[in-house]
């Protein structure tokens, strides 16, 4: 347990839910989010603002549990050894010795929130950002295709164009290839949706077991611009972090992300979609959601 945990802020949320934007904005507001940060790449040109010390630790924990980020193993089955707890405590102590007020952002933190970090930093403040599950899943698939140098919409257009001019035998092969391709899309929709649910379930469990409801706040990704003033007041005035104002618009990417229309209309797993809708509504209606004046 770290005695100075009340000066620590956890930036929590699922991958592709706006955690990078939140971390970048608060960094410009004067919040220390790490000295060694994961930089920008093709899928996240604005930068990740992830502290590599925590990212590497979480990846080691995932590897110890024989899984990977966005893998197929549920977090409630993860094993945490005494070695990991000592390492987490030492890392938190080290950061606190260097900085009076500090934070970190890594979506993997959600997976170890209830079985590790809540014990190591019981008095830490928590800022949770969430996003509609369909937007998250389509963003993850778009990211995967970007890293492969491909575009879902352009591939669909290419299939349509080729089918309109191809000979019968070629059409059969094209249909076979597209069917295989869409099976991979189906697999990733289910995998990423399941991971969205696991992350939100861990965050829900954290909120329900957190002894001080005033030590946490929730904001929807879609509401971040509208709630930036209230959020900054929460972190600065209520929680005592010495921040200054900085316009969110100055750190947000100017180019809008266009949803993959065919992916939104694609059949979604009904069993997982029902769970996701219930969790989405939970976070929308939670009293700590800044939209309700928390």
Image (cartoon, grey):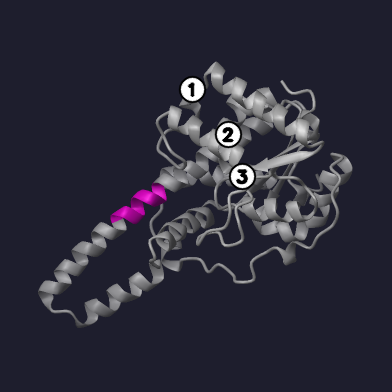
How packed mark 2 is, by other alpha carbons closer than 10 Å (few <14, some 14-19, many 20 or more), is many
Toward the top, the furthest residue is: 82
Name the residue beneath numbered marker 2.
Answer: 202
In the rendered image, the vertical position of residue 16 relative to residue 58, given as above or below: below
Q: Quadrant of the N terminus?
A: top right
Q: Residue 104 — which label? A: none
How packed mark 3 is, by other alpha carbons closer than 10 Å (few <14, some 14-19, many 20 or more), is many
> Residues under labels 1 and 3: Cα distance?
21 Å
Lower position in the chain sequence, tag 1 or tag 3? 3
Secondary structure at badge 2 equals: helix
Toward the left, the furthest residue is: 169
> Residues under labels 2 and 1: Cα distance?
15 Å
Lower position in the chain sequence, tag 2 or tag 1? 1
Discs 1/3, front: 1
Name the residue beneath numbered marker 3.
Answer: 13
* Quadrant position of residue 113: top right
Using the rendered image of the protein, determine whether residue 66 is visible from the camera's viewpoint.
yes
Query: Mark 2 and 3 residues: CB-CB less than 8 Å, in contact?
Result: no
Toward the bottom, the furthest residue is: 165
Q: Residue 79 — which label? A: 1
Lower position in the chain sequence, tag 2 or tag 3? 3
> Residues under labels 2 and 3: Cα distance?
10 Å
The picture places residue 225, in percent across and down from the top left corner, at 73, 61
Question: Which contiguous range is marked in magenta?
Answer: 183-190
Secondary structure at badge 1 equals: loop
């Amino acid at each position: 347990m770290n005695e100075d945990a009340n000066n620590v802020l956890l930036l929590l949320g699922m991958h592709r839910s706006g955690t990078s934007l939140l971390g970048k904005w608060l960094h410009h507001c004067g919040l220390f989010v790490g000295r060694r940060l994961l930089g920008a790449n093709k899928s996240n040109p604005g930068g990740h603002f992830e502290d590599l010390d925590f990212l590497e630790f979480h990846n080691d924990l995932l590897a110890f549990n024989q899984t990977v980020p966005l893998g197929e193993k549920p977090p409630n089955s993860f094993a945490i050894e005494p070695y990991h707890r000592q390492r987490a405590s030492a890392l938190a102590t080290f950061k606190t010795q260097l900085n009076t007020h500090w934070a970190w952002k890594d979506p993997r933190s959600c997976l170890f929130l209830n079985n590790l970090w809540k014990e190591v930093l019981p008095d830490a403040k928590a800022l949770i950002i969430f996003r509609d599950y369909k937007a998250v899943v389509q963003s993850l698939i778009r990211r995967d295709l970007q890293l492969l140098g491909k575009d879902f919409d352009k591939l669909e257009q290419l299939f349509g164009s080729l089918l309109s001019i191809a000979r019968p035998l070629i059409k059969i092969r094209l249909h076979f290839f597209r069917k295989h391709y869409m099976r991979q899309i189906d697999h990733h929709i289910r995998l990423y949706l399941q991971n969205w649910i696991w992350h939100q379930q861990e965050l829900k469990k954290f909120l329900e077991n957190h002894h001080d409801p005033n030590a946490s706040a929730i904001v929807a990704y879609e509401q971040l611009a509208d709630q930036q003033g209230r959020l900054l007041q929460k972190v600065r005035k209520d929680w005592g972090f010495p921040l200054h104002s900085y316009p969110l618009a100055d750190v947000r990417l100017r180019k809008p992300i266009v949803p993959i229309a065919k992916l939104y209309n694609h059949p979604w797993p009904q069993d997982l979609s029902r769970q996701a809708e219930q969790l989405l509504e939970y976070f929308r209606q939670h009293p700590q959601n800044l939209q309700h004046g928390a």
